[in-house]
Image (tube, grey):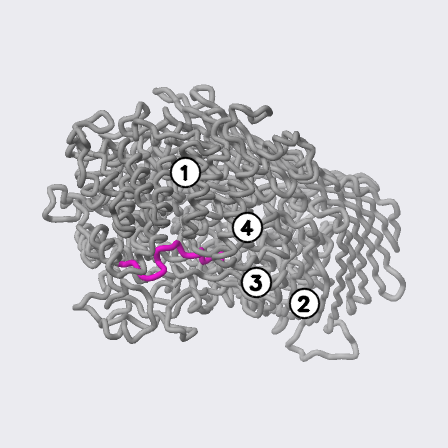
């Protein structure tokens, strides 16, 4: 039966060309022509037509016997129509009063990553994501700044179930949308764990009345580390080392001494060239979905392989995953189930610290600072890795490419994340519904860590006499049972009320076991049984959380909106008297465009103002911290016979209690100029008090780990803007969105006597922001002995060419009391820019993000610029001070560094401008036209080419300006692994 | 249902349930001893950072901290210096717990006295090491409440008064030997004895130049004194090997055990102890040319040994046990001399001993106090008290073991200053590379004497960068940063 009609844009009545129309449950379909008109043959006039078009809401229209059907489509981003996932339910965006940012699944998929958390980067204002460049790297996510001193990562909730441990195990391809709950009101329903914000992840479901749909998507790409640290080659290196020794009055090291028979003139290793390789990544995803009248199903199978860019055993990351989501309903009953299983294999970037002498820096630092006068391999030694000699090189150099082939470490994760719910509508009539829901979930992660170290000798510093193996298994589990009752009623006169009450009990914990064996005969069989001596270790812990909560939503005529929430949480992590905390919040909204007495200027289509205030709790600390314990395994021996001592080794605070975060938020949401512009602006101020943190204590206590205490108070405030523009007409349609946020952080108290907290080259003090750079001010370089004599005393060995430090307290001596603040380590602003466009069959994406206003303290750069050491140098060192090169700000070379030029200071390069802009994604796609697809018998088919991390505009002389860092040293880059540039080709196809 | 939230720690007893039984008391004391095995105590840094500063030892290392300490310009941010600080306060914390809880506990009375005595001894030893290395430090004498964490620096007087008091308390409680006691500690050689406490008490008086009090204590250990159970080992090397540990010359030593001896899979550098900890010493590998070779002996000490030959016309019998040399060592570690240099330290290495030089895995006990030190310190007290003839006898007793000629008559005629110079020479040879030398130099006031400083500079050019006060280790910057009541010391500038 023939059906015809015209499809138009609801917002402006213009016709829409290229709209897809299919007959529901069949492969029959067509598209609208340039005039928005269509014509198709439906098997029956009882069928239903599905109209879909990018950027618009898909609608289903029953033919209902008609032969002419005109349809209006409304843009999806139209504010009032979006369905937003909130805690324990969904809401329409126009009804929202809290601060929630949403990210659409399609946008996210234009970035390839192993970790769903990476997808948030640059997408929404107020969220900062930092990550390193190795496969499987876990990013740091901070929603609205550093809210606490301890664990700052938000709570992840997948389909309503809180995630116990790492989010990394989850497959990004399963995600349809991510919502980020930023203020107290939005997050309040998750009270106890929501202080750092909540990330709600919704995964794909099937659709009712749909025959089996099959979709494949996949890509293949190569990864290149395009950045290089410019380091010196052999001749410059030897010249610089020799100069440093001569300046110190010390004899030259044989390998660098042209007069020595051991002089090295035939090796010039470029370690970055030898150590970095082309990595590759691929992903295959197969999804089956559909549904009957009352059931839906969605099954996905996914494989991800990401092979890193460092020569040797890792870092690599590989993941297999599968998810099955189903739902069914009949009458007043409904249930749903989700089952996710994943197996991952990670070869991490880290060595087991006990394997290599003297705690090593991140491998990339060791790689870059390796000396050019050492080769890679030495077949004459056990293990075959060339190493440095005390006499010939003196430098302590880890041969990274070779060591990374010798040592083997991997982590295998097997994780099951299963949840199910049942629902019954106890009351369901026209005015009101009352729904009871019970849900349960279990998240179990088995982690096997294997670390193998064969016998090897690598120079004078690194060796292993007996091959050893650590093989351990950790199990983490979280079980949650939840009961909720939801009552919804529309009262006469447009009063809509929804009341939710609920109870949840959560129990989690971990079981840790490790087996160790050493002394393996050759040939090696790397299982514990083959070691000559074996030891085992193990421990376990558990936690429990019990909560009661209630939420009231009130909506009067879509004009006045109110949400009020109260949650009471009990945590096993606190002593009995402090166990429970109450966390209330409230928010209001006003849709001005729905007011009659009030007429907005005509260019404003929609305008809402909203405000919220509330409190959230935090208890993310370790278990049992309020009870002192006795370590009963402290070995000693009496003349060779082993005995065990026991004592208290750590101090505790017995009074710890909930940390509380109080947030105030105001915002506006507006659409204007024919709904083409969409703006959200928000301002927030949040204060975290009773912060749970391990504040450093004097080591005169004899306890080397500081106890967790409630110390301090922090305030964060910021402005967040998100603006988008959609052009939906014509051959060329596009969508531009930008977001921008500022962050201001202030420490209001630090607990106890408000003693400052020192980090790596930082100080955190009341009245300032967290982790400001702290050290000496440099006033230049001493040019003469006279200048040294006239300056405050620095050191007996200070000589011309050394740095002149400012005598801040003017006491005539340069010492620790002359340290002062040297700048911020926290980005002051972050932003993201996204462009997606479509021209006929082609689509384009450009996505960029950045941050700025802070300074970076770079371990890798400082390592390469050390005055004193025998390691390799940055090329900047060639401009060091010498009697002939006085006009420089780089001090002289002198082994032993008597002036301590290496101390924390603002000397050139020690603190670097952190501002950057990274082009994260550039992609071009081509979708097969309808005619070809019909011929071949496929649905939507798209091929694309994508470049990820194309370029980063940065001042920073390290690899990666958005490294992950510690709370008290946010501006300290300990040696972040470079982010590779990836070239990818991909295919999406549906059957 | 609050019970659901009441979870108990399944891993360890809590403080509420410990410190009850006699067994708990014994274990508490053992835990104090275990803190002697860490990087910041005797496993490495107490010997390394002390020997490095002496005129008999110089750095030859790529590790900046080691040569900066040796050259007296170590920054207060140094990790190894902080480990020494931390390691000793761990000893003190554990001792304080025993001293706090054990007196009230139901423990067999004589055993209780011995346990308390050991806690006093170890705390005294920790404060002694802190005082001689850091000059002035805070006194912590009981487990602290959070409000008490920021302890002020104690005066030099108070600090030494506490050291004397701790050793006195120990002396009044400890037995001569554990072979004769009854109780769980019966036969456990290596525990602190009354001899150890008496020797350290005397030594701590000596450091304060309280000569007659020091002499009184030393007399208890020699020639018919109540605790005179010690004698010099005939073979000097037996004081630095595995096969003659806890020997007749030893008043107190730290019980190291190689992995082969006592097992373990986790290096005992520091951190939270666990049952798999090793108990090995890093000193052998740190000093040996087969290891890191972080230090070399100076030519001066090598020459000093050769000033005087034995009665048989051979080298001082202490030379070879102290220094390995191309001159007289045809083979080292079972192979030909293949080192680029001519002399290297041997004392506390495994060269010539049955076991090989394994990576940071030496089981050689560290001898904290030897009887020869008692003899020479006693001689020093007698010289300072004007009894040069007595001093001469005790000096000769130590010389005899080295095979050196009898010069009692000559020494007896020395002036007090001549005798001081002779003692300085004798002590340099007897105690080279034993973490003693720099402390002798400091207490003798050589740094206040420009001529002596010049002499030191001639012996070891590392003294060129010495500045007043830098003979001490600086108070760790982290500690100064966190505790506003703590004072920097002269080495902090």
Residues in magenta? Answer: B465-479
What's the mark number on residue A117? 4
Check disc 1 and report its element: helix, strand or loop.
Answer: strand
Check disc 4 and report its element: helix, strand or loop.
Answer: helix
Q: CA distance from mark 2 to mark 1?
A: 65 Å
Q: Foreground residue, A942 or A49?
A: A942
Residue that mark 1 sits on: B368
Q: Predominant secondary structure in magenta? A: loop
Contact check, label 3 and label 2, Cβ < 8 Å: no
Contact check, label 4 and label 1, Cβ < 8 Å: no
What's the mark number on residue A755? 3
Task: Answer with mark 2 or mark 4, whichever residue precedes in sequence.
Answer: 4
Res. A844 visible in picture: no
Image position of A979 (left or right of A422): left
Q: CA distance from mark 4 to mark 3?
A: 35 Å
Task: Answer with mark 3 or mark 2, whichever residue precedes in sequence.
Answer: 2
Q: Foreground residue, A470 or B51?
A: B51
Q: Position of residue A818 (x, y in %)?
A: 42, 69
Image position of A528 (left or right of B96): left
What's the mark number on residue A665? 2
When asked about the image quadrant of residue A329, the answer is: top right
Image depth: mark 2 or mark 1 in front: 1
Q: Do badges 3 and 2 share one subunit?
A: yes
Check disc 2 and report its element: helix, strand or loop.
Answer: strand
Image depth: mark 4 or mark 1 in front: 1
- Locate the C terminus of chain A by quadrant: top right
Contact check, label 2 and label 4, Cβ < 8 Å: no
Q: CA distance from mark 3 to mark 1?
A: 38 Å
């Amino acid at each position: 039966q023939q059906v015809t009609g015209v499809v138009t844009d609801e917002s402006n009545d213009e016709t829409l060309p290229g709209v897809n129309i299919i007959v529901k449950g069949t492969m029959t379909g067509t598209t609208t022509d340039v005039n928005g008109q269509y014509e198709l043959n439906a098997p029956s006039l009882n069928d239903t037509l599905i109209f879909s078009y990018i950027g618009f809401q898909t609608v289903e229209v029953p033919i209902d016997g008609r032969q002419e059907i005109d349809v209006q489509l409304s843009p999806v981003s139209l504010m009032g129509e979006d369905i937003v996932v909130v805690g324990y339910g969904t809401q329409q965006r126009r009804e929202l009063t809290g601060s929630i940012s949403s990210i659409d699944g399609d946008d996210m998929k234009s970035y390839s990553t192993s970790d769903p958390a990476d997808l948030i980067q640059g997408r929404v204002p107020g969220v900062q994501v930092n990550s390193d460049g190795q496969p499987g790297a876990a990013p740091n996510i901070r929603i609205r700044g550093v809210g606490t001193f301890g664990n700052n990562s938000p709570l992840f909730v997948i389909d309503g179930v809180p995630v116990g441990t790492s989010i990394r195990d989850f497959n990004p391809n399963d995600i349809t949308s991510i919502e980020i709950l930023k203020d107290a009101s939005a997050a309040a329903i998750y009270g106890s764990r929501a202080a750092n914000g909540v990330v709600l992840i919704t995964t794909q479901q099937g659709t009712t009345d749909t025959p089996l749909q099959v979709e494949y998507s996949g890509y293949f790409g190569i990864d290149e580390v395009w950045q290089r640290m410019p380091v010196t080659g052999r001749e410059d290196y030897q010249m610089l080392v020799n100069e440093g020794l001569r300046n110190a009055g010390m004899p030259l090291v044989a390998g660098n001494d042209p007069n020595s028979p051991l002089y090295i003139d035939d090796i010039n290793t470029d370690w970055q060239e030898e150590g970095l390789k082309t990595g590759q990544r691929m992903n295959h995803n197969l999804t089956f979905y559909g549904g009957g009248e009352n059931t839906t199903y969605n099954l996905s199978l996914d494989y991800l392989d990401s092979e890193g860019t460092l020569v040797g055993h890792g870092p690599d990351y590989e993941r297999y995953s599968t998810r099955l989501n189903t739902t069914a309903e009949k009458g007043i009953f409904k249930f749903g189930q989700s089952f996710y299983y994943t197996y991952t294999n990670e070869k991490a970037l880290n060595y087991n610290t006990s394997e290599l002498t003297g705690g090593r820096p991140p491998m990339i630092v060791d790689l870059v600072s390796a000396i050019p006068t050492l080769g890679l391999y030495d077949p004459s030694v056990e293990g075959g890795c060339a190493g440095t000699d005390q006499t010939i090189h003196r430098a302590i150099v880890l041969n990274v490419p070779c060591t990374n082939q010798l040592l083997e470490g991997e982590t295998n994760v097997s994780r099951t994340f299963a949840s199910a719910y049942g629902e019954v509508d106890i009351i369901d009539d026209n005015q009101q519904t009352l729904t009871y829901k019970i849900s349960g979930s279990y998240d179990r992660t088995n982690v096997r860590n294997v670390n193998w170290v064969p016998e090897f000798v690598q120079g004078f510093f690194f060796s292993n006499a007996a091959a050893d193996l650590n093989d351990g298994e950790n199990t983490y589990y979280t079980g949650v049972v939840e009961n909720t009752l939801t009552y919804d009623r529309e009262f006469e006169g447009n009063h809509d009320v929804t009341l939710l009450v609920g109870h949840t009990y959560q129990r989690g914990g971990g079981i840790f076991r490790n087996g160790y064996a050493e002394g393996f005969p050759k040939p090696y069989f790397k299982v514990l049984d083959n070691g000559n001596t074996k030891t085992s270790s193990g421990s376990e812990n558990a936690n429990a959380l019990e909560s009661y909560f209630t939420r009231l939503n009130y909506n009067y005529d879509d004009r006045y909106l109110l949400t009020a929430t109260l949650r009471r949480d009990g945590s096993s992590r606190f002593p009995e008297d402090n166990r429970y905390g109450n966390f209330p919040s409230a928010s209001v909204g006003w849709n001005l465009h729905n007011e009659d007495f009030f007429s907005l200027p005509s260019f404003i289509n929609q305008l809402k103002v909203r405000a919220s205030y509330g409190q959230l709790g935090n208890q993310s600390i370790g278990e049992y911290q309020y009870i002192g314990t006795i370590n009963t395994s402290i070995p000693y021996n009496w003349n060779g016979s082993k005995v065990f001592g026991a004592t208290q080794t750590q101090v505790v605070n017995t009074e710890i209690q909930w940390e509380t975060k109080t947030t105030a938020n105001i915002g506006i949401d507006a659409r204007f100029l024919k709904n083409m512009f969409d703006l959200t602006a928000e301002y927030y101020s949040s204060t975290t008090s009773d912060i749970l943190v391990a504040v450093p204590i004097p080591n005169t206590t004899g306890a080397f780990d500081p106890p967790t205490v409630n110390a301090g108070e922090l305030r964060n405030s910021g402005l967040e803007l998100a603006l988008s523009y959609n052009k939906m007409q014509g051959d060329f349609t596009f969508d531009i969105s930008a977001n921008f946020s500022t962050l201001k952080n202030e420490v209001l108290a630090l607990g106890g006597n408000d003693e400052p907290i020192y980090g790596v080259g930082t100080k955190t003090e009341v009245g300032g922001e967290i982790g400001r750079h702290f050290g000496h001010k440099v006033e230049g370089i001493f040019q003469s002995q006279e200048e040294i004599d006239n300056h405050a005393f620095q050191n007996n060995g200070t000589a011309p060419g050394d740095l002149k430090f400012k005598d801040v307290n003017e006491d005539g001596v340069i010492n620790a009391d002359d340290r002062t603040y040297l700048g911020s380590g926290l980005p002051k602003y972050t932003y993201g820019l996204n462009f997606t466009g479509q021209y006929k069959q082609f689509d384009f994406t450009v996505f960029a993000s950045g941050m700025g206003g802070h300074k970076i303290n770079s371990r890798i750069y400082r390592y390469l610029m050390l005055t004193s050491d025998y390691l390799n140098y940055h090329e900047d060192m060639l401009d060091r001070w010498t009697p002939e090169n006085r006009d420089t700000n780089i001090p002289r070379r002198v082994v032993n560094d008597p002036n301590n030029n290496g101390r924390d200071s603002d000397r050139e390069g020690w603190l670097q401008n952190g501002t950057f802009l990274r082009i994260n994604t550039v992609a071009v796609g081509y979708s097969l036209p309808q005619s070809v697809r019909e011929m071949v018998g496929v649905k939507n088919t798209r091929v694309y080419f994508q470049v990820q991390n194309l370029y980063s505009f940065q001042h920073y002389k390290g690899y990666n300006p958005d490294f992950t860092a510690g709370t008290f040293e946010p501006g300290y880059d300990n040696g972040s692994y470079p982010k590779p540039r990836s070239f990818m080709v991909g295919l999406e196809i549906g059957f | 249902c609050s019970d659901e939230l009441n979870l108990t720690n399944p891993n360890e007893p809590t403080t509420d349930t410990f410190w009850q039984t006699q067994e708990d008391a014994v274990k508490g004391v053992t835990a104090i001893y275990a803190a002697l095995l860490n990087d910041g105590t005797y496993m490495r840094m107490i010997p390394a950072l002390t020997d490095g500063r002496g005129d008999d030892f110089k750095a030859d290392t790529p590790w900046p901290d080691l040569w900066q300490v040796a050259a007296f310009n170590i920054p207060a941010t140094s990790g190894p210096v902080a480990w020494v600080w931390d390691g000793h306060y761990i000893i003190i914390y554990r001792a304080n717990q025993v001293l706090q809880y054990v007196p009230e506990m139901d423990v067999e009375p004589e055993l209780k006295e011995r346990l308390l005595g050991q806690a006093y001894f170890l705390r005294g030893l920790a404060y002694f090491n802190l005082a001689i290395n850091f000059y002035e430090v805070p006194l912590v004498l009981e487990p602290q409440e959070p409000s008490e964490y920021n302890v002020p620096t104690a005066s030099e007087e108070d600090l030494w008064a506490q050291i004397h008091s701790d050793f006195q308390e120990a002396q009044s409680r400890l037995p001569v030997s554990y072979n004769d006691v009854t109780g769980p500690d019966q036969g456990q050689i290596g525990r602190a004895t009354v001899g150890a406490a008496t020797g350290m008490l005397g030594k701590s008086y000596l450091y304060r130049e309280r000569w007659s009090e020091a002499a009184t204590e030393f007399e208890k250990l020699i020639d018919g004194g109540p605790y005179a159970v010690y004698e010099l080992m005939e073979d000097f090397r037996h004081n630095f090997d595995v096969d003659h540990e806890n020997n007749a010359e030893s008043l107190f030593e730290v019980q190291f055990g190689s992995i082969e001896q006592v097992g373990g899979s986790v290096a005992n550098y520091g951190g939270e102890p666990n049952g798999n900890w090793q108990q090995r010493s890093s000193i052998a590998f740190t000093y040996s040319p087969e290891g890191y070779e972080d230090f070399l002996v100076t030519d001066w000490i090598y020459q000093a040994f050769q000033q005087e030959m034995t009665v048989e016309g051979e080298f001082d019998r202490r030379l070879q046990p102290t220094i390995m040399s191309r001159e007289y060592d045809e083979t080292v570690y079972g192979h030909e001399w293949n080192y680029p240099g001519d002399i290297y330290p041997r004392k506390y290495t495994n060269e010539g001993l049955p076991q090989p030089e394994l990576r940071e895995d030496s089981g050689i006990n560290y001898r904290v106090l030897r009887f020869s030190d008692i003899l020479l310190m006693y001689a020093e007290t007698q010289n300072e008290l004007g009894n040069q003839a007595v001093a001469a006898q005790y000096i000769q007793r130590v010389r005899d073991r080295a095979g050196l000629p009898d010069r009692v008559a000559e020494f007896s005629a020395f002036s007090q200053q001549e005798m001081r110079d002779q003692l300085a020479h004798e002590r340099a040879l007897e105690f080279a590379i034993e973490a003693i030398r720099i402390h002798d130099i400091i207490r003798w006031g050589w740094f206040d004497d420009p001529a002596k400083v010049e002499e030191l500079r001639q012996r070891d050019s590392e003294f060129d960068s010495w500045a007043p006060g830098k003979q001490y280790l600086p108070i760790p910057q982290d500690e100064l940063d966190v505790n506003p009541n703590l004072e920097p010391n002269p080495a902090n500038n």
